[in-house]
Image: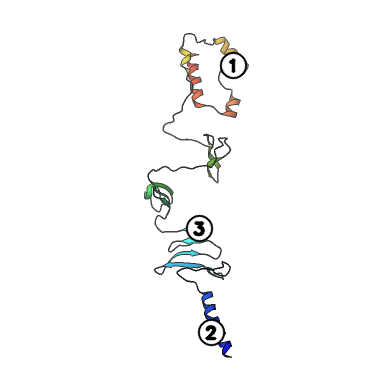
C-alpha cells in the first residue's frame, strides 16, 4: 500500500508538469498535444489591459482591432480601426502604408477611399513583375466588374487602354517628321495621280485604309507627320 501511494505521489507532479505551459518557454513539446488554442468551437481572444486586441475565429479567420462590428466576413485577415486604419510595412528606409480614409481630405482622399502612401527616402510606388522575358505575355491590370480588365501594362513596355483618356496635355515622341516635303528635291504627286489613287484604293496616297485603321489603330506621331505631309501635297 505504501508503495502504491508513493508511486501515485510521484506520478501526480509529472502529470501536472506535462499539462502546464510555462511562460518562460517550453521544450519537448508536441504540436499534436501541446498548443495554445481551443478544442471546441470557441474563438481565441487576446487582450491587453482587459481590452480585446485580436481574435482568432473557429474557422481560422483573424480579426485585429477593438470594437470591430464584424464586416462582410469575406476577409481571412481583417484589421479594424474606427478612424483611418493603417496597415504598414516598414524598414530603416521608411514605410509603405495602406490606409482607409474615413473623412474627406484625410490623407489626400475622400471618405471611403483607399490610399497607398510611401513615406521615407523616396515616395515611389512600383508595381513589379518577376519577369525579364520582355515578350508581352504578362501584365499589371486595372479592372472593374462592368468592363473587365480595361487597362493593361505589359512586360514589354506596352500599355493598352480599352476606354477613353481625358488629359490636359499629351506629349508623343516622334521618330520621323514631315519637314522633308519642303526640300527642293521632294516630288509632289500631281492631282491626276492623287485622283487615280483614290479611285483605285479608296484613300489618299501613303495614308492607311479605313479597314487597316479599324484593325490596327494608328500611330499618333506617324499620323500627324502624314497630315503635315498632305498640307504640302
Tell me the residue that label 1 is attached to. 198
In what quadrant of the picture does the N terminus appear? bottom right
The mark that comes first in sequence, 3 or 1, is 3
The answer for how far apart the CA atoms under marks 3 and 1 are is: 65 Å
Numbered disc in front, either 2 or 1 = 2
> In the rendered image, which residue does mark 3 sit on?
77
Pair 3/1: label in front: 3
Percent coordinates x, y for residue 58 in the rendering = 55, 66
Tag 1's secondary structure?
Answer: helix
Query: Reading the chain from its start, which is encountered first: label 2 or label 1?
Result: 2
Foreground residue among 60 and 120:
120
Q: Position of residue 28 (x, y in %)?
A: 54, 68
> Which numbered mark, 2 or 3, is in the foreground of this view?
2
Q: Secondary structure at mark 2?
A: helix
Task: Tell me residue 119's x, y (percent).
Answer: 38, 47
Residue that sits furthest to the front in the current view: 3
Which label sits on residue 9? 2
Extreme residue in the right direction: 200
For label 1, the crowd category at 10 Å Cα-Cα, with few meaning under 14, some 14 to 19 and many 20 or more, is few
Q: CA distance from mark 2 to mark 3?
A: 47 Å
For disc 3, the neighbor class at 10 Å (few under 14, some 14 to 19, many from 20) is: few
Q: Are marks 2 and 3 in contact (CB under 8 Å)?
A: no
Residue 138 is tagged as none
> Residue at image x 57%, y 26%?
213
Task: Report which quarter residue 193 is drawn in.
Answer: top right
Which type of secondary structure does the marked residue at label 3 adopt? strand
Picture quadrant of residue 168: top left
Amino acid at each position: 500500500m505504501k508503495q502504491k501511494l508513493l508511486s501515485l505521489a510521484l506520478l501526480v507532479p509529472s502529470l501536472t508538469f506535462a499539462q502546464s505551459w510555462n511562460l518562460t518557454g517550453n521544450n519537448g513539446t508536441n504540436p499534436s498535444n501541446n498548443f495554445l488554442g481551443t478544442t471546441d468551437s470557441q474563438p481565441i481572444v487576446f487582450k491587453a489591459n482587459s481590452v480585446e486586441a485580436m481574435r482568432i475565429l473557429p474557422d481560422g479567420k483573424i480579426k485585429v482591432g477593438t470594437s470591430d462590428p464584424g464586416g462582410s466576413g469575406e476577409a481571412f485577415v481583417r484589421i479594424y480601426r474606427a478612424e483611418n486604419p493603417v496597415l504598414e510595412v516598414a524598414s530603416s528606409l521608411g514605410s509603405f502604408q495602406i490606409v482607409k480614409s474615413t473623412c474627406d481630405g484625410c490623407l489626400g482622399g475622400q471618405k471611403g477611399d483607399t490610399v497607398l502612401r510611401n513615406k521615407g527616402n523616396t515616395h515611389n510606388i512600383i508595381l513589379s513583375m518577376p519577369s525579364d522575358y520582355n515578350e508581352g505575355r504578362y501584365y499589371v491590370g486595372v479592372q472593374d466588374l462592368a468592363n473587365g480588365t480595361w487597362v493593361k501594362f505589359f512586360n514589354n513596355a506596352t500599355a493598352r487602354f480599352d476606354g477613353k483618356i481625358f488629359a490636359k496635355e499629351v506629349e508623343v515622341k516622334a521618330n520621323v517628321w514631315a519637314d522633308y516635303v519642303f526640300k527642293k528635291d521632294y516630288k509632289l504627286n500631281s492631282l491626276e495621280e492623287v485622283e487615280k489613287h483614290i479611285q483605285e484604293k479608296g484613300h489618299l496616297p501613303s495614308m492607311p485604309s479605313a479597314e487597316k485603321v479599324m484593325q490596327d489603330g494608328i500611330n499618333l506621331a506617324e499620323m500627324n507627320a502624314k497630315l503635315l505631309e498632305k498640307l504640302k501635297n
